[in-house]
Amino acid sequence: MNQSWVKTHRILALLLGVFILSHLGIHLTALGGADMHIKVLSNVQPLYRNWVIEPLLIVAIIAQIFIGSKLLWRRWKQPQKTAWGWAQILSGIYIAIFLSIHSSAALITRYIIGLDTNFYWASATLNVAPLQYFFTPYYFFGVFSMFVHLAAAIHFGWEKSGKILSSLITVLGILIGILIVLAFNGSLFAIDLPPEYIKLFTLTDGG
């Protein structure tokens, strides 16, 4: 594969990584309650929810998925893959699926349905039956895969010095994934879902 694709992938990974990690940091503020998360998110959203940055983010995600798929295919064809090789492949596949679903769902909810994708949007998927049985692992592995993919890149890029760091990043991904799910599913505090979000994710009307 042309080295320019690899360089582009790394540049996009750095830019998107900053956005994603900051986004996860915002989600961790939900540990302090729904109101805190909504307040922090509303203060940050103008930075990327505008007609300049948001389209660029969408293009960057699409480009990263396209280029990443080519790099993963190259990794897939390599014989005798190590555990980290498989970790890089599987986490990359999951990230591509997660970003495709999550980004498109957020855009549809905001621009077509007309609801804000705030704390209650994510929380409803973890509290309305039976959706929580899908979305609990969906969100956890979404977070976990980001950290595993980063850990794999460090493992292959830094050789010996990256082994311990890669393991620590993986463990951190597990902890953050668990904390975010617990904050949004009502395990840490009571969540009073607005009726419009319950209606959005209710699969039947009871009739």
Image (cartoon, helix red, strand yellow):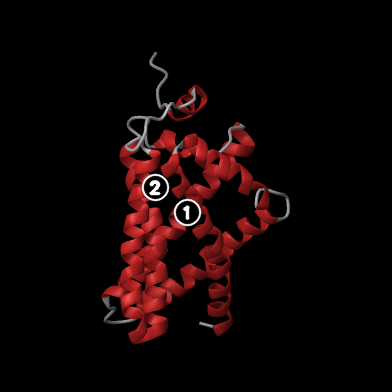
Specify which label sits upstream in the sequence, 2 or 1.
1
Residue 108 falls left or right of residue 174: right
Q: Residue furthest bottom?
A: 160
The residue at the point 66 percent across, 48 percent down is 49
Q: Nearer the viewer, residue 144 or 206?
A: 144
Let me know if residue 85 appears in the view. Answer: no
Q: Are marks 2 and 1 in contact (CB under 8 Å)?
A: yes
Tell me the residue that label 2 is attached to. Answer: 180
Query: What x and y, as percent, mark residue 117?
Result: 55, 39
Corner quadrant of residue 172:
bottom left
SS for dot 1: helix
Q: Residues within 10 Å of mark 2 (few under 14, many from 20)?
A: many
Residue 109 appears at what percent x and percent y? Answer: 56, 37
- What residue is shown at x 36% (from left), y 60% (from top)? 173
* Residue under the image location 41 percent in, 44 percent down: 31
* Three-letter code for the amino acid on which mark 1 is drawn: Leu
Sort mark 1 into few (<14), some (14-19) or many (20+) by Cα contacts within 10 Å. some
Is residue 48 positioned above or below 68 on the image? above
Q: CA distance from mark 2 to mark 1?
A: 8 Å
Q: Nearer the viewer, residue 13 or 186?
A: 186
Q: Looking at the picture, how far across and down is residue 158, in whole percent?
A: 40, 84
Q: Answer left or right for 138 relative to 117.
A: left
Q: Which mark is residue 24?
A: 1
Asked if one can make out residue 35 in the rendered structure from this viewpoint, the answer is: yes
Tell me the element at label 2: helix
- Residue type marked 2: Ile
Q: Quadrant of residue 165?
A: bottom left
The image position of residue 1, as x and y in percent, is 50, 82
Q: How many marks?
A: 2
The residue depicted at 58 percent of the width and 36 percent of the height is: 116
